[in-house]
Image (spheres, rainbow, N blue to C red):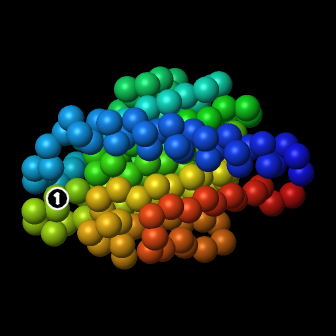
Amino acid sequence: MRHHQQNILRVLAVGMLVAMGAAQSASAQSATAATPQTPSTAVGYVKTVTGEAWVTTAGQRAKAVPGTAIQIGSQLKTLADASLGITFKDNTVMAFGPDTELTVDQYLYAPAQGQLQLGASLLKGSLNYVSGVIAKLKPEAVTVKTPTGIIGVRGTQFVAKVEDVQ
């Protein structure tokens, strides 16, 4: 139980660090209209990594380092004792604890056209989610699927944990 609590605290800490970095980068970015993203367009970037984590996009597996691009269809994976923090273009922040797997299923950020969508699948592990512009403008456009249900985002932050079935 103590190890589980440490993992949750690690995810929360990484999430806070990534959120602070997102706030700093948001001030450097303009809030201009975006064009709809294609699968080959970066929709976010790795901000923090501790331990070993991987990003697999279009069959290409790359070690996650700060600055690694995240695209629609990217699969993110942390190994034991690892954590990963990513920030999307709309400043949504996701932080992952050890032994976590998540796939970015959908991402559309064109606020001037009212086109907003963020969908992800959390297969296992822990996730700390902090809302960005998409959830603030259109909360129903954000979903996180798990093996047992779908989380609809209606607030600004949540923590989820999906455990392996033994």
Q: Amino acid at mark 1?
A: Ala
* Count of numbered badges drawn on the protein: 1
Q: Is residue 110 above or below residue 9?
A: below
| Helix, strand or loop for disc 1 | strand
Q: In the rendered image, which quarter contains the C terminus?
A: bottom right
Is residue 128 rendered to the left or right of residue 104? right
Coordinates of residue 50 in the picture (x, y in percent): 61, 26
Report which quarter residue 140 is drawn in: bottom left
Task: Check the image and name the residue furthest to the right.
Answer: 1
* Rendered residue at 35%/66% (across/down): 135
- 106 up-or-down from 91: above or below: below
Query: To which residue does mark 1 refer?
Result: 110
* Residue drawn where x is 58% and y is 30% of the image: 53
Residue 164: % across, % down: 77, 55
Q: Is residue 6 at all visible to an observer of this figure? A: yes
Residue at the image point whose x is 70% and y is 45% from the top: 9
Residue appearing at x 41%, y 59% in the figure: 131
Could you say where residue 17 lies in the image, as x and y percent from the top left? 51, 37
Rate crowding at label 1 as few (under 14), some (14 to 19) or many (20 or more) other CA atoms within 10 Å. Answer: some
Residue situated in front as seen by the camera: 33 or 120 = 33
Is there any visible trace of residue 99 in the rendered image?
no
Quarter assignment of residue 163:
bottom right
* Residue 57 x %, y %: 41, 37
